[in-house]
């Protein structure tokens, strides 16, 4: 049963009633940096003060492979609990960490402008991906990235890695790894783009590069406030990618890449499912109108997933949606 929350006064323009908005965030450098960007945008758009409320999640303190800890959801549960308890008024997640199943009492109130959705390589000596020597050790905690790396370079040694961005980069500097794969968006946000030595063309995780501003369903004032930082293209592409992932019922352990891009008239979507060893993959592509992508993302996702399954995707990965 959800706790009753006292009504909030909807944030108004500068000079109006002032309410300090409490923004819940993970305490890592990347999380506080991206939450700080959202806080700055909210201050500028609404004139309200915003304070960050650091929250420690299981994903920040537990060790071991992410998939064995419960997937990317370990990073969001504590934030959502704090929001439902009224300890903060909104929370900011990396969209790719957000499970696709809805949570009663909560909703995504805004998707700010999206950063790059690409994966990038950070290698010793400035090496590109093609220039890595045979047998080079590459680190990633993502089964999708493992499959994509193996598909293109089966000669590489791909091993799991955990830790924040600087911890992972240090493992390259110290010689533990020859290279690691990270999200370009995170490096851009913390001003570490200079460590990038190559960029990958493959589809990344659903929602990668996007942020999700989550709020309580019953907080009309907060809904009005965060709507000011919503970006239509970011919302359309990120939520369409998530619709495909949701229909596949694929968690973080499933090697699935999804990417949507907008142009003047349409949204172009590509989805791939890989065998973990990288030897096989199934790809689906579709272009839909912007209106269809916004208004009927589940129907678009249904068509894309049907094409993936018809191509044999269920034989490559554990996809709960293949049973439908």
Image: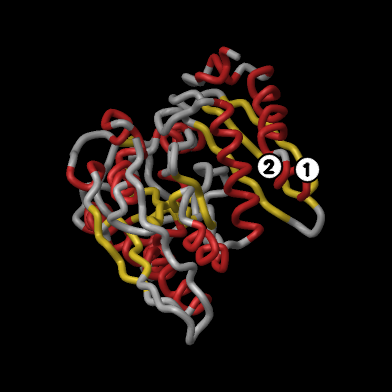
| Residue at left offset 56%, top offset 17% | 314
Marks 2 and 1: which is nearer the front? 1
Quadrant of the rendering where the N terminus is positioned: top left
Residue 57 rendering spot, x and y as whole percentages: 24, 46
Residue 26 rendering spot, x and y as whole percentages: 29, 55
Mark 2 vs 1: CB contact within 8 A: yes
Quadrant of the rendering where the C terminus is positioned: top right
97 is higher (above) or lower (below) than 5: above
| Residue at left offset 52%, top offset 50% | 200
73 is higher (above) or lower (below) than 168: above
**Which of these two is toward me, 84 or 199?**
84
46 is higher (above) or lower (below) than 175: below
Chain-order first, disc 2 or disc 1: 2
Residue 224 rendering spot, x and y as whole percentages: 54, 64
**Which of these two is toward me, 303 or 4?**
4
| Residue at left offset 49%, top offset 23% | 275
Residue ID for mark 2:
269
User: Quick one: label 2, few (<14), some, or many (20+) residues within 10 Å?
Assistant: many
Q: CA distance from mark 2 to mark 1?
A: 8 Å
Residue 137 in view of the camera: no
Residue ID for mark 1:
288
| Residue at left offset 65%, top offset 51% | 236
User: Quick one: label 1, few (<14), some, or many (20+) residues within 10 Å?
Assistant: some
Residue 197 in view of the camera: yes
């Amino acid at each position: 049963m959800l706790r009753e929350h006292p009504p909030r006064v909807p944030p108004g323009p500068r000079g109006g009633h002032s309410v300090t908005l409490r923004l819940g965030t993970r305490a890592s450098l990347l999380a506080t940096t991206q939450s700080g960007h959202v806080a700055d945008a909210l201050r500028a758009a609404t004139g309200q003060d915003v304070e960050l409320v650091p929250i420690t999640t299981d994903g920040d303190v537990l060790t071991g492979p992410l998939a064995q800890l419960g997937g990317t959801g370990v990073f969001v549960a504590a934030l959502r609990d704090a929001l439902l308890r009224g300890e903060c008024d909104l929370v900011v997640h990396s969209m790719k960490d957000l499970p696709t199943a809805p949570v009663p009492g909560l909703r995504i109130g805004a998707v700010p402008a999206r950063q790059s959705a690409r994966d990038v390589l950070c290698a010793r000596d400035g090496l590109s991906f093609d220039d890595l020597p045979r047998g080079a050790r590459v680190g990633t905690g993502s089964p999708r990235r493992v499959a994509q790396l193996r598909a293109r370079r089966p000669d590489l040694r791909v091993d799991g890695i955990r830790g924040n961005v600087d911890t992972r980069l240090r493992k390259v500097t110290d010689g533990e790894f020859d290279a690691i794969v990270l999200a370009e968006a995170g490096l851009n946000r913390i001003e570490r783009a200079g460590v990038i030595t190559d960029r990958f063309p493959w589809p990344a995780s659903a929602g990668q590069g996007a942020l999700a501003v989550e709020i309580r369903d019953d907080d009309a004032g907060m809904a009005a406030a965060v709507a000011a930082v919503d970006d239509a293209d970011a919302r359309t592409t990120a939520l369409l990618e998530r619709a495909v992932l949701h229909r596949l019922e694929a968690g973080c352990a499933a090697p699935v890449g999804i990417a949507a891009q907008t142009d003047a008239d349409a949204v172009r979507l590509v989805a791939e499912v890989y065998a973990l060893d990288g030897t096989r993959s199934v790809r689906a592509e579709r272009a839909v109108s912007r209106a269809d992508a916004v208004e009927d993302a589940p129907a678009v996702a249904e068509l894309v997933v049907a094409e993936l399954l018809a191509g044999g995707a269920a034989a490559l990965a554990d996809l709960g949606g293949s049973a439908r």
